[in-house]
Image (cartoon, rainbow, N blue to C red):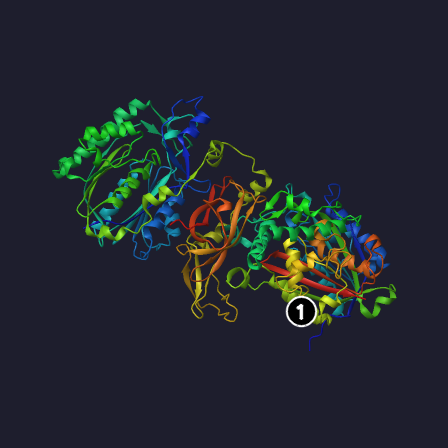
Amino acid sequence: MAESIKDKVAIIGMGCTKFGELWDKSPEDLIIEAYKETMEDAGIEKKDIQAAWLGSHLDDISIGRGVIIFSMALKLPFIPVTRTENFCATGTEALRGACYAVASGAYDIALALGVEKLKDVGYAGLPESGNLNMEGTLGRFTTPARTAPGAYAMMATGYFAKYGLSPEDGKRTLAKISSKSHHNGTLNPKAHLRREVSVEDVMKAPIIAWPLGLYDCCGVSDGAAAAIVTRADMAKNFRPDPVYVKALQIAASSGEELLYTDYDYAHVETTYRAGIAAYREAGIKNPREELSMMETHDCFSINELTQYEDLGISPRGRAKEDVDAGFFNIDGKIPNEVDGGLKCFGHPIGASGLRMVYEIYKQLQGKAGPRQLKDPKIGLTHNMGGTPPSCVVAVGIVGL
Amino acid sequence: MVGIISYGVHIPWHRISHKTISSAMGWFNAASPPGEKAVANYDEDSITMAVSAGMDCLDNLEREKIDGLYFATTTSPYTERQGAGIIATALDIRPDIRIADFAHSTKAGTTALISACEVVKAEAAKSMMLCASDCRLGKPGSTQEHIYGDGGAALLMGDNMVIASLEGYYSLSYDFTGEWRASWEDFGHSLEDRFVQDEGHSKFIPQAISGLLQKYQLSIKDFAKVIYPGPSARLHAAIGRRLGAEPEQIQDPMLTSVGNTGVAHTLIMLVAALEEAKPGDRLLVASYGNGSDALFFQVTEEIENMKDRRGIKDSLALRKELSNYEKYVAFRNILPVEKGIRGEKYEGYFTPLARQWRERRAILALCGSRCKRCGTPQYPPQRICVKPGCGAIDEMEPYRFSDKKGRLFTYTADNLSYSPSPPAIYGMINFEGGGRYWFDFTDCDADSLKVGMPVEMIFRRKYADKEHGMNTYFWKAIPVRT
């Protein structure tokens, strides 16, 4: 009889580099810095690590393929090392690998590290689908010249059309979301973007892919984050305040959204499905009441808006009301993107899933400094890769 | 009786006025003819225009019965890769046919037409397709820059339901180097205009026509329309007078609306004449280029069935002024523009050609699959049915999307994406009858798009990988044209 992962695995150490356009850092530098902080936080030695999971997405421009650069940079002593990749959900995928290894009983202590060195690509933004065969060789012939902003911009148009929002009202709702995250970023010394940005700034910003403007899109950043996980029943040997994994779920697109005509391009089906599975695994019946905080995948403001609904917190089509009420602000009922989110902390693709856990981990231990929330108990990470009709979403829940 | 069964045209959406050209280049070439000409968009070439004209021609006709395809052009992107092969695949025609490219002379279109009819007459084929197009480049500051327009025409020839039967033909062929272009050159050359007009146009067209009239014991008066190309209105009228034709017999050469479209020119004019023709009309046609082919048709009762075609008139009405000369020369790669590393990578990444070969029908013909169990069309073709609850494995039949219309479900105009004509516009299309996918848009402005608007598909060049000599073609969406 299959069991859930709830309370089988604990996180006893985490690290996270500063994210940003780190021209002076190589992938190896990022790996080593995240590793050093993690090991110091966990209080263990290299020989204690029994297996490692590396998450990184854009091999061609970043860290290459496989795990060799990683295992050799850290001088890992001939232990099992696995590479995971799942578009922008890569970070959570690395954590899942480490957690399932420990939950299986095969290992006691495992390392998960996510890293991305995006700024060596030589131009602004991420490569397009079609470039580098991101969607397989058929994509080179058949997919439009689509960027990430463009693919999500289509969800903004779809959402506005479905729920009757004028472009102006729709953009303003999105602007409030971005502005909120920018405020949180000013409280975080590790964030890539640390400037207040008003709703008007967002409304007036240059258009990247209509209707999304500059401040509707997250930064393209370098960075790394890591975690040490161990069996729940061993956790207190390492520290008095471990954080426990309550759920780790992933849902991948079936093809219905892109190829069959029912999908409304106004929500993300994989977020919805992974959310339901994660809540069930963690035993959460009413997320709107029970979650203390979230770190969701706000690569684009429209994505965050639909997450409020797909994660079962705001009613369908009415997330605007919660945004207007400040429900997700740092002083709201369920603060989201407390560390600035992808929007401001940045989005080094392979690291993001782990960075999300890092903020919740620090919050639960009371170590979030100027961003400290009052008495958080349980937090949700939402980490998405791909585009709204063709994607994978990982939802994780960690708590005390 | 052998002749034309159906016809189609493609006239590019962009028009550039001669004033725009002379505003840019008048300091060098003071000439400023009246009107405008049609110019290919950045994603068009002779192949795409031929396919587009072919789609128009084959509308509602059975493609399985086509026994051959000829492609006539002087501007094929390839010297070794049969244009007719790309076109036949895109039009989803059977592979067990004979195809050929008729090239290197602006009279190649009529030569191909005659040859196609001869094949049918010899009963070696029931029907033959002809696609003719040209995309010639005049050097900035040249007369040719004003004269050359871009366009395509397609004819289906056969012996059943003929709308205009080919009654006779006569050819004159010379090695006339009035205008020429070497295989290694982008731009051609020409001797002085007067030489080309006096020794070329003014002699070959009348000589070929009089040879035809003599051969069949006919006179110019026997024809409802006299159809021949020319580089200028004045010369065109002078040739008409020399032939002894009345002004109302002379088919408008569309020099102030489309321009001289090379191989396609005579055939586009023929289509225009067919649109207005009545049963019993005789049409006299002569091409020009290294000589002249003269031929004549007799229009039949079947012409009445062609009245619902899009046609020349609607194609001419669908236009967008290209008011920027720099954009025109950038589209034609005369003016290098900064693509940036993003753009260079987008075009330069080596195309997985083994995959294109394996899935040529899906890519070039936009052929997907339809589940035989639940009837759901899907693109790209799937082996496992996409419909939730069905999931049938390997119960598919081919299903063509290229001729289906659809509705625009959502879209964006992307300023970040690389496009030779920014912003890159793309969106999700829901097809009539089922199926959906996302496509680039072309021949439209972002602010003309609306969620829910009707759209159709058109064949375009997706990108050109210059380093590997490979153009990649696919289908884009455009607002419905009629």
**B321 versus B477 height, above or below:** above
Residue A270: quadrant of the picture? bottom right
Q: Is residue A153 left or right of residue B162?
A: right
Q: Quadrant of the N terminus of chain A?
A: bottom right
**Residue where numbered disc 1 is placed:** A277
On screen, A184 above or below A10? Answer: above
- Observer able to see residue B188: no
- Disc 1 crowd rating (10 Å Cα; few below 14, some 14-19, many 20+) is some
Residue B259 placement (x, y as % from top left): 35, 34
**Of B239 and B115, the residue lying toward us:** B239
Of A74 and B225, the residue lying toward us: B225
Residue B148 x, y percent position in the rendering = 37, 33
Note whether B87 is above or below A239 in the view shown. Answer: above
Looking at the image, residue B227 lies above or below residue B301: above
In the image shown, does B371 or B427 lie closer to the viewer?
B427
- Left or right: B278 with respect to B344? left
Percent coordinates x, y for residue A277 in the rendering: 67, 69
Query: Which residue occupies the foreground of this view, B54 or B224?
Result: B224
Marker count (numbered): 1
What residue type is disc 1 on?
Ala
Q: Residue at x 36, y 32 (%)?
A: B35
Q: In the picture provided, is B380 more to the left or to the right than A39?
A: left
Label 1: which secondary element: helix
Q: Is residue B468 visible?
A: yes
**At which x and y percent is residue A92?**
70, 60
Going by the image, does B3 lie left or right of A160?
A: left
